[in-house]
Each structure stands twice: as C-alpha cells, then as structure tokens.
C-alpha cells in the first residue's frame, strides 16, 4: 500500500492511537466477560464449570489496580448469588459496586488501609466453609495492596523494605520473593486461609512470562521461592544493613526453620484451587500491532518479556530505529517496533520520574538529529513511578527543543528527573487511572523521506 509521508506531529498522534488501542484490548471488565459466563445455575470460567447449586455461599475477594472493573463484571454475571466481597484497589482506581466492598489503599508503598483490607480478606477466607466458592480477582499492584505483615513485623518495616527494594534496581521477581516471605497473605497463604472452600482466581498478569507465583506475589498459588532466595537477593544488592533489623532477623529465622516456609507445590491447600490468566501484555501488544498496520506501518513485535536496566533497553530500541533508517533492517520504513515488559531503574538522583519517562529521555538523546523517529513508552496502568504520568513521548526534535529552552538532558537523566524534563516540554503521557495493568507498552515509529507517496 502507498504510505503518505507523515511529519513528526502526525507520527506522535499515531503513537498515541496505537498505545490506546493496546489499552482497550486489556480492559479488565471485558476480559472477565470473555472468560466467564453464566447459564442458568452454572457458571463457566474458561474451561471450568461450577454448579452454583452445590455452593452455600459465593464470596469475592481480591486486590490490584484492575480489580474494581473485574469485580463489577462478576457482579453483573452472578447478581445476588454474590453473598459478600472485599477488594483492595489503588486510590482512584474504582468502579461502582453493590455487594462487594471496595477499599482504596496505597501503592506502590502499602498503607494502613491496605493492611486493614488485607486482614478483612483473610478473615473472610478463613470463615469460608467446604461448601462455599471463593472467586479471587488479582491484578498488578496486588502485592502492595495486600500488606499483612507476619507477626513480629510492622507495616513500617514493610514500607521501608519496599522503598529500599524499589530504589536499588531489584526486579519485580526479586521484590515479590521478599514480599511473600514477610507476609501472612502472599506466597500461597491466601489459598491456605481459604481451604477447604473451593477457590478460583481470575488473574490479569503484570509480570514477564506471566509467572503465577509472581503476579501480586502469588497469594493463591504454590510459592517457588524460599527464605534462602530472599537472603541471596538482599546480599546481591548489598542492602542487609539498610533493611529494618526485624526484616533481616525474620529472614534468618525462616532459613533456620524457626518461621514456616510458604506453601509449596503438592500442599493439600491447593487441591481445590484454580488459577486462570485472563489478560496479559502480549494481548495489548497484539492489538497495538493491528492498529499500527491500519495506519500504514510495517510492524514487528520485539518481545513482551523485556527486562533489564531502563537506559540500556532504551539504547537498544533507539539503535534499532537508527538501523531501520540506515539499512532497512530488521524491517523497512515506514516501520513500527513494539515491545512490552517491565524494566528497572536504579535511583541515584533526587528527581521525579518513572521507568517509562526515563526510557523516553534516554532514547531521545540517542535519536537526536536523525530523520523522523518517534518513541513512546507508557505504563498500561496510567502511572509511571510516583507520578501522575503513564510515561512520555520523545522524537527526533526533542533535544533541540530542550536546548532552546535551556534544558540539559544529561543533568535530568543523571538526577532521575525525567518527569520535570518532559513536563517542561509538554511531552508527558497523561492517561489518568486506566483501571488495568499489564506492564508497559513501548512504540517506536520510523519513517524516511523516500516513502512512496506525497507528504501529508
């Protein structure tokens, strides 16, 4: 097909359209609707069938940034068969609910609201009987939103620990391994509380490879990590002296056997538990690919599983964009490169930002002065780090515009202050709460002056 050459402004608009197409594909309510249906007195969840007449009560529990619309759809499907429910969500990530209590709580650093809600959720699970059905709704953010410290630990211990882990560059897998071992609800302990009730969890994945025991720290699945793993992570990042002393002592007690391990594969508490992933990053990327192709771009998906240092990943993406301009590889222009996953930032400065904004800033420095390149990086939850932005958008002219305004990108990057850099340029990606969360979506658009057709 002929492709009319687009200027930077039009490419930026395309990048945002592609991003929002990815978001729509992982709408949590629609995901529940795709996987769940009711026919008379039966509810079908994926390939499972539950005869509602066999259950005395149906309870709904859960936590995560996307849990509110998931709960709303469950209420639509089951109606008055829902006896009671409790879910924890991030502040502002709400929906109108009837029978299910919604508690807004802190994320990424847990707070007292989250602790109270987590305690109520465990109490509900503990009081369920063998003739009851519990539907558990889990999405990204569930770890921070289910803070229930192990006896002897405090909420502040957990808060301080999470802050240290977030700032040292630990991966979500590593962070959640520690979360599971200092919690009374994560790492399979919620399934332990629910047994012998029947338990089915509907899960929206926000982790690379969709590892069930990592999503929201795996409250309803066997835990593959151990106290030994936790200590190795602590020593890997040299944070033993920085962590609260009760946390380190608790990990040591776990290694020595004085604190019980999280339940593992084969534990009978999982005999009546089912876990079903109803949405993930690749679905968002696939929808984005369809949209980019309708806009005339030749499109490839790099991966939905990209991890690692944000700046390094940004350099790889910008290098691919420059390769397209020079040699037409790995795909000729007009090109769209898509990727997903979740990178990490080691915080060394005192600025404000998140991994997506830092990605866009690092990439902007690489693509300065080239032909038409636009790079967008955004979190599908609408929140990038402790900011009100989902991410940012950069292009070939970003650095020249910044220089004209007296902004030094090297300084902003060194100070981890990408938010204020893009705020001054008006290039933050602001979506507001999206009520979903399947990690990040990165979009790289490349065109040259030799495309077939007149310039728009």
Image (cartoon, rainbow, N blue to C red):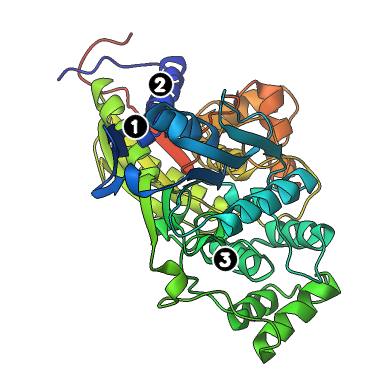
Of labels 1 and 3, earlier in sequence is 1
User: Can you give x and y, in whole percent of width and height, for residue 198 in the image?
Assistant: 42, 57
For disc 3, the marked residue is 189
Relative to 100, does residue 279 appear above or below in the rendering? below
Q: Is residue 266 visible?
A: yes
- Secondary structure under tag 1 reads helix
Please name which of the two marks, 1 or 2, marks the residue nearer to the observer. Answer: 1
Measure the alpha-carbon separation of dots 1 and 3.
28 Å
Measure the alpha-carbon separation of dots 2 and 3.
41 Å
| Residue occupying the point 66% across, 80% down | 231
| Residue occupying the point 35% across, 50% down | 303
Q: Mark 3 and mark 2 in contact (Cβ < 8 Å)?
A: no
Of labels 1 and 2, earlier in sequence is 2
For disc 2, the marked residue is 17
- Secondary structure under tag 3 reads helix
For disc 1, the marked residue is 33
Q: Please name whichever residue, 450 or 130, is drawn nearer the observer in this view of the structure.
A: 130
- Secondary structure under tag 2 reads helix
């Amino acid at each position: 097909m002929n492709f009319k050459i687009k200027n930077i402004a039009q490419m930026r608009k395309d990048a945002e359209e592609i991003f929002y197409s990815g978001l729509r594909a992982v709408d949590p309510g629609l995901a529940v609707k795709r996987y769940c249906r009711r026919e008379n007195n039966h509810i079908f969840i994926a390939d499972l069938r539950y005869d509602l007449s066999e259950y005395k009560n149906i309870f709904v529990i859960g936590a995560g940034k996307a849990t509110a619309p998931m709960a709303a759809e469950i209420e639509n499907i089951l109606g008055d068969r829902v006896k009671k429910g409790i879910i924890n969500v991030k502040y502002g990530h709400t929906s109108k609910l009837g029978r299910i209590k919604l508690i807004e709580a802190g994320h990424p650093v847990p707070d007292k609201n989250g602790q109270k809600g987590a305690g109520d959720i465990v109490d509900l699970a503990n009081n369920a009987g063998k003739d009851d059905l519990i539907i558990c709704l889990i999405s990204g953010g569930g770890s921070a939103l289910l803070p229930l410290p192990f006896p002897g630990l405090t909420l502040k211990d957990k808060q301080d620990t999470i802050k240290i882990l977030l700032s040292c560059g630990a991966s979500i897998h590593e962070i959640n391994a520690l979360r599971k071992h200092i919690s009374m609800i994560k790492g399979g302990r919620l399934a332990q509380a629910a047994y012998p009730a029947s338990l089915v969890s509907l899960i929206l994945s926000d982790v690379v490879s969709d590892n069930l025991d990592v999503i929201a720290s795996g409250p309803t699945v066997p835990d593959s990590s151990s106290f030994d793993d936790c200590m190795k992570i602590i020593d890997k990042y040299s944070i033993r002296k920085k962590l609260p002393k009760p946390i380190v002592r608790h990990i040591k007690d776990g290694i020595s056997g004085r604190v019980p391990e999280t339940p593992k594969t084969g534990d009978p508490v999982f005999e009546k538990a089912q876990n079903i992933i109803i949405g993930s990053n690749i679905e968002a990327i696939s929808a984005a690919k369809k949209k980019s192709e309708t806009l005339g771009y030749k499109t490839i998906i790099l991966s939905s599983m990209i991890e690692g240092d944000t700046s390094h990943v940004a350099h790889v993406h910008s290098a691919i964009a420059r390769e397209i301009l020079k040699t037409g590889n790995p795909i000729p222009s007009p090109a769209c490169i898509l990727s997903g996953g979740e990178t990490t930032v080691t915080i060394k400065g005192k600025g404000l930002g998140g991994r997506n904004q830092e990605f866009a800033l690092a990439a902007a420095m690489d693509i300065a002065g080239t032909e038409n390149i636009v790079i967008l990086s955004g979190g599908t939850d609408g929140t990038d780090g402790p900011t009100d932005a989902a991410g940012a958008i950069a292009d070939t002219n970003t650095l020249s515009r910044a220089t004209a305004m007296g902004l030094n990108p090297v300084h902003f990057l060194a100070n981890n202050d990408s938010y204020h850099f893009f705020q001054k340029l008006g290039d933050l990606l602001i979506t507001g709460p999206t009520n979903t969360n399947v990690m990040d979506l990165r979009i790289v658009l490349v065109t040259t002056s030799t495309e077939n057709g007149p310039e728009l």
